Image (cartoon, rainbow, N blue to C red):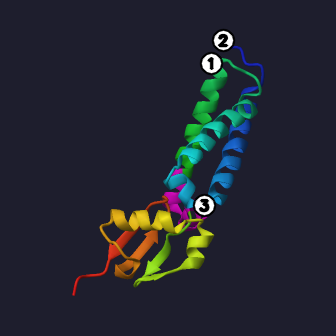
Amino acid sequence: MWRLTQPWWEFVLRALLVYGFLMVGLRLTGKRQVGQLAPFDFVMLLVLSNAVQNSMNAGDNTVLGGFILVATLLALNALMGWWTWRSKRAETLLEGRPQILVHNGVLDEAVLASERITRHELMAAVRQAGVSDVADIRVAILETNGRINVIAKSAP
């Protein structure tokens, strides 16, 4: 239960490598996947967690090995949070930048395509904001957390 089958530093190294790989992979999939989990996105996250488990623990199922992995991942996550707070460049690299989807009633199809957002997803956010037509939007922004914020034009 407590005797490790691998050296402690190997758990730390494996956790760092897997965390980094997953961060890059999830970042490349776009903001929408993380911010607005569709059922298949949720299933993908569950499968990913199972897929990387053995690569982190190297077959070691001891409690101490689990503690080392959890401590490493929590420390790394705290470090990433601190780094993005301190550095604008790190924040942009890790979290991206907000993207304008609609400006003064004009839909930017190129941004929708690059962020892999369908018109249905955009219109759901528009309706949720109480607007029924894209022409009535002053600005719709895809935030770095995956949410779409919609600001309607002022009534005349």
Q: Are marks 1 and 2 in contact (CB under 8 Å)?
A: yes
Residue under pointer 1: 63
- Whether residue 141 is in magenta: the answer is no
**Residue type, mark 1 in image:** Val
Image quadrant where residue 135 sits:
bottom left
Q: Quadrant of the N terminus?
A: top right
**Residue type, mark 3 in image:** Gly
Q: Report whether residue 79 is seen.
A: yes
Residue under pointer 2: 1
Q: Which mark, residue 99? A: none
- Which residue corresponds to the image point at 68% horizontal and 53% vertical from the top-left? 25
Q: Are marks 1 and 3 in contact (CB under 8 Å)?
A: no
Under circle 3, the secondary element is loop
Spatial separation of the CA atoms under disc 1 and disc 2: 6 Å
In this orientation, which residue lies closer to the viewer: 31 or 13?
31
Spatial separation of the CA atoms under disc 1 and disc 3: 35 Å
Give the x, y percent position of residue 19: 66, 44
Q: Which residues are magenta?
A: 81-95
Under circle 1, the secondary element is helix
Position of 40 relative to 27 (above/below):
above
Position of 56 relative to 17 (above/below):
above
